[in-house]
Amino acid sequence: MIEVKNYVELYELNGKSLTGIRSDKTSLLVESHWNRNEFVILKIGDNDSFTVSASDLISAINNATNSNRL
Protein backbone atom coordinates (compact mmCIF):
# COMPACT_ATOMS: atom_id res chain seq x y z
CA MET A 1 0.00 0.00 0.00
CA ILE A 2 1.18 3.50 -0.81
CA GLU A 3 0.23 6.06 1.79
CA VAL A 4 -0.28 9.69 0.76
CA LYS A 5 -0.43 12.53 3.29
CA ASN A 6 -1.20 16.18 2.59
CA TYR A 7 -1.20 18.96 5.16
CA VAL A 8 -3.48 21.96 4.71
CA GLU A 9 -2.72 25.04 6.81
CA LEU A 10 -5.55 26.24 9.04
CA TYR A 11 -6.11 30.00 9.19
CA GLU A 12 -8.85 30.25 11.84
CA LEU A 13 -10.14 28.10 14.68
CA ASN A 14 -13.65 28.89 15.89
CA GLY A 15 -13.37 32.28 14.17
CA LYS A 16 -10.04 33.21 15.78
CA SER A 17 -6.88 33.73 13.73
CA LEU A 18 -4.12 31.14 13.97
CA THR A 19 -1.57 33.35 12.21
CA GLY A 20 1.85 32.93 13.81
CA ILE A 21 0.83 29.82 15.77
CA ARG A 22 2.53 26.56 14.78
CA SER A 23 1.54 23.15 16.12
CA ASP A 24 0.07 19.88 14.91
CA LYS A 25 -3.34 21.39 15.62
CA THR A 26 -2.88 24.16 13.04
CA SER A 27 -2.91 21.80 10.06
CA LEU A 28 -5.59 19.59 8.55
CA LEU A 29 -4.16 16.23 7.52
CA VAL A 30 -5.75 14.71 4.44
CA GLU A 31 -4.51 11.19 3.83
CA SER A 32 -5.30 8.27 1.61
CA HIS A 33 -7.66 5.60 2.89
CA TRP A 34 -5.98 2.31 3.65
CA ASN A 35 -8.35 0.26 1.48
CA ARG A 36 -10.57 2.41 -0.76
CA ASN A 37 -9.45 5.00 -3.33
CA GLU A 38 -12.77 6.85 -3.22
CA PHE A 39 -12.30 7.75 0.47
CA VAL A 40 -9.90 10.11 2.25
CA ILE A 41 -9.19 10.45 5.97
CA LEU A 42 -9.25 13.88 7.64
CA LYS A 43 -7.44 14.58 10.94
CA ILE A 44 -6.59 17.59 13.10
CA GLY A 45 -4.01 16.84 15.77
CA ASP A 46 -4.06 13.41 17.37
CA ASN A 47 -7.79 13.35 18.01
CA ASP A 48 -10.55 11.80 15.94
CA SER A 49 -10.19 10.93 12.29
CA PHE A 50 -13.01 11.22 9.78
CA THR A 51 -13.38 9.11 6.66
CA VAL A 52 -15.25 10.91 3.89
CA SER A 53 -15.99 10.47 0.22
CA ALA A 54 -13.26 12.26 -1.77
CA SER A 55 -15.70 13.30 -4.50
CA ASP A 56 -18.20 14.63 -1.93
CA LEU A 57 -15.44 16.66 -0.29
CA ILE A 58 -14.33 18.09 -3.64
CA SER A 59 -17.95 19.01 -4.48
CA ALA A 60 -18.45 20.63 -1.07
CA ILE A 61 -15.29 22.73 -1.48
CA ASN A 62 -16.30 23.78 -4.99
CA ASN A 63 -19.78 24.74 -3.79
CA ALA A 64 -18.49 26.64 -0.75
CA THR A 65 -16.01 28.66 -2.81
CA ASN A 66 -18.52 29.39 -5.57
CA SER A 67 -21.02 31.30 -3.42
CA ASN A 68 -21.99 34.76 -4.61
CA ARG A 69 -20.91 37.29 -2.00
CA LEU A 70 -22.42 40.75 -2.27
Image (tube, rainbow, N blue to C red):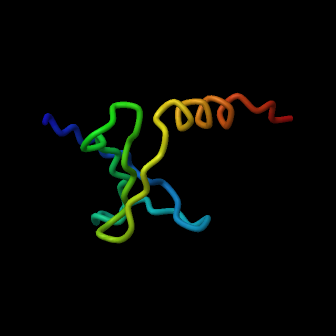
- Give the residue displayed 81% in from the left and 30% down from the top: 68
58, 33: nearer the viewer: 33
Q: Nearer the viewer, residue 58 or 37?
A: 37
Image check: 70 left or right of 8? right
Identify the residue at image location x=14%, y=34%: 2
Q: Quadrant of residue 31?
A: top left
Residue furthest left as drawn: 1
Taking the image as shown, residue 2 lies to the left or right of residue 24, namely left
Image quarter hosting the N terminus: top left
For the residue pair 7 and 31, the one nearer the viewer reads as 31
Q: Is residue 60 above or below residue 26?
A: above
Name the image quarter holding residue 23.
Answer: bottom left
Q: Residue 45's x, y, as percent?
A: 32, 66
Q: Is residue 8 above or below residue 1?
A: below
In the image: residue 57, left or right of residue 44: right
Q: Is residue 70 above or below residue 21?
A: above
User: Is residue 34 left or right of 25 when viewed as pictured?
Assistant: left
Residue at 48%, 54% (x, y): give it: 11
Horizontal and vertical percent position of residue 58: 53, 31
Residue at figure coordinates x 30%, y 63% from the top left: 22
Q: Looking at this rendering, what residue extends furthest in the front direction?
A: 35
- The total of numbered circles placed on residues is 0
Image quarter hosting the C terminus: top right
Residue situated furthest bottom in the rendering: 47
The location of residue 5, given as percent across then percent down, is 24, 42
